[in-house]
Image: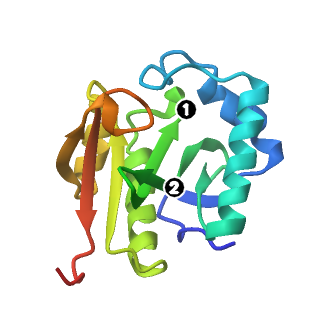
Amino acid sequence: MPCPAATDRLTFRELSDSDVDNLQLIFSDPIAMEHYPSTKDVAATQEWIDWSLRNYERRGHGLWAVMLSRTGEFLGQCGLIPQNIRGLDEIEVGYLFCRSHWGNGYATEAAAACRDYGFRQLGCEKLVSFINPGNERSKRVAERVGMTLEKILLPEENLWAKEVCVFSITRPDASN
């Protein structure tokens, strides 16, 4: 499956079963997972990878492993995730990185590459990011890639049953 083009510092590849340990660097970290329902154990991490593999097969995209170009080191994951909110099919730019790599601009660089991939290769007219209201780091990433706060979903309006900020961006040449 195709992945976003490499950036100056990052490369992308599909997640695989061999990424359990890589993802556990994020999923077992309570600080990195602070804005998610909980940390994930190895079995839940494997389920996450299996879900990603199904997305590649069904949709041709999903979350990709993000690697540091010069060393091949795993930094995190970023990609385009199918979501259905209030009966609307949306494509989310999702990102989650190892805490040891926070503050280097990798999430912004990866999210921008995925945004461009969604607009140019997939022909998406709009992309969204669903962010916990208290997750200021993720909000800043969304804003840096051109997203703005579109709305706040109430707990009864989404499958996470909690308040969720919806950031969005429309393809610059998309017709209204």
Q: Residue at x 18, y 47 (%)?
A: 149
* Residue that protrudes farthest toward the right in the picture: 18
How far is the residue under mark 1 from the one under mark 2? Answer: 19 Å
Q: Where is residue 117 in the image (x, y as percent from the top left)?
A: 46, 72
- Of callouts 1 and 2, the N-terminal one: 2
Q: Nearer the viewer, mark 1 or mark 2?
A: 2
Q: Is residue 157 above or below residue 121?
A: above
Number of marks present in the image shown: 2
Q: Indicate the quadrant containing the N terminus: top left, top right, bottom left or bottom right.
A: bottom right
Circle number at residue 66: none
Q: What residue type is labelled 2?
A: Ile
Q: Mark 1 points at which residue?
A: 98
Q: Position of residue 85 (x, y in %)?
A: 38, 50
Q: Which residue is drawn at 38% across and 34% down?
A: 103
Mark 2 packing: few (<14 Cα in 10 Å), some, or many (20+)?
many
Disc 1, SS: loop
Asked whether residue 132 is in view, the answer is no
In this image, 106 relative to 73: left or right?
A: left
Q: Position of residue 27 (x, y in %)?
A: 62, 27
Q: Name the residue under label 2.
A: 81
Disc 2, SS: strand
Image quarter for residue 91? Answer: bottom left
Q: Which residue is drawn at 44% across and 37% down?
A: 159
Q: What residue type is labelled 1?
A: Cys
Q: Indicate the quadrant containing the C terminus: top left, top right, bottom left or bottom right.
A: bottom left
Q: Which residue is drawn at 65% across and 23% down?
A: 40
Image quarter for residue 88? Answer: bottom left
